[in-house]
């Protein structure tokens, strides 16, 4: 099974999750450090991948504007539903694409960095 975001084919190169807890460090006059825990932030997932074609680029771009959550799936099944916080596209310097045989060889290839926010029910 391939990596997809709402059935848009991604060629994932790197994937990382960030979990953050909010902790205040207080130093009272008497010395020492006191920690106060104020909760946590939901996981932020960052995906470095490649996509092929203007249609897939435009499809990802449109999903950054619609305030919806979409299914992110990989070889191990569904990872969950995510909204795109940020999508950064960079045109890759390739002469002939071979990632997607269903598209023309001269289709543009983009390096894409996605920042995804998980939808927790």
Image (cartoon, helix red, strand yellow):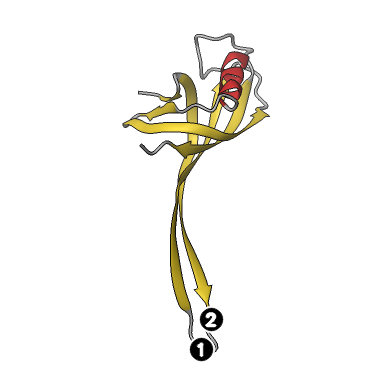
Which residue is located at x 38 percent, y 39 percent?
120
Which residue is located at x 58 percent, y 8 percent?
104
Image x and y of residue 19, in percent: 44, 52
Secondary element type, mark 1 = loop
Q: Is residue 85 above or below residue 16?
A: above
Q: Residue furthest bottom?
A: 30
**Within-10-Å neighbours for mark 2: few <14, some 14–19, many 20+:** few
Which residue is located at x 50 percent, y 11 percent?
101
Q: Is residue 21 above or below residue 75?
A: below
In the picture of the structure, the residue carrying the numbered disc 2 is 27
Instruction: Report whether 29 appears left or right of 94.
Output: left
Q: Is residue 63 above or below residue 21?
A: above
In the picture of the structure, the residue carrying the numbered disc 1 is 31
Q: CA distance from mark 1 to mark 2?
A: 6 Å
**Within-10-Å neighbours for mark 1: few <14, some 14–19, many 20+:** few
Image x and y of residue 55, in percent: 59, 14
């Amino acid at each position: 099974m391939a990596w997809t975001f709402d059935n848009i084919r991604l060629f994932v190169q790197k994937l990382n999750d960030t979990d953050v807890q909010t902790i205040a460090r207080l130093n009272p006059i008497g010395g020492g450090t006191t920690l106060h825990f104020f909760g946590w932030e939901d996981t932020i997932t960052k995906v470095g991948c490649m996509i092929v074609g203007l249609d897939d680029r435009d499809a990802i771009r449109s999903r950054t504007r619609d305030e919806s959550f979409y299914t992110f799936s990989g070889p191990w099944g569904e990872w969950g539903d995510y909204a795109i916080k940020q999508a950064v596209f960079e045109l890759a310097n390739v002469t002939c694409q071979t990632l997607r045989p269903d598209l023309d060889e001269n289709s543009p290839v983009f390096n894409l960095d996605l920042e995804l926010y998980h939808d927790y029910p």
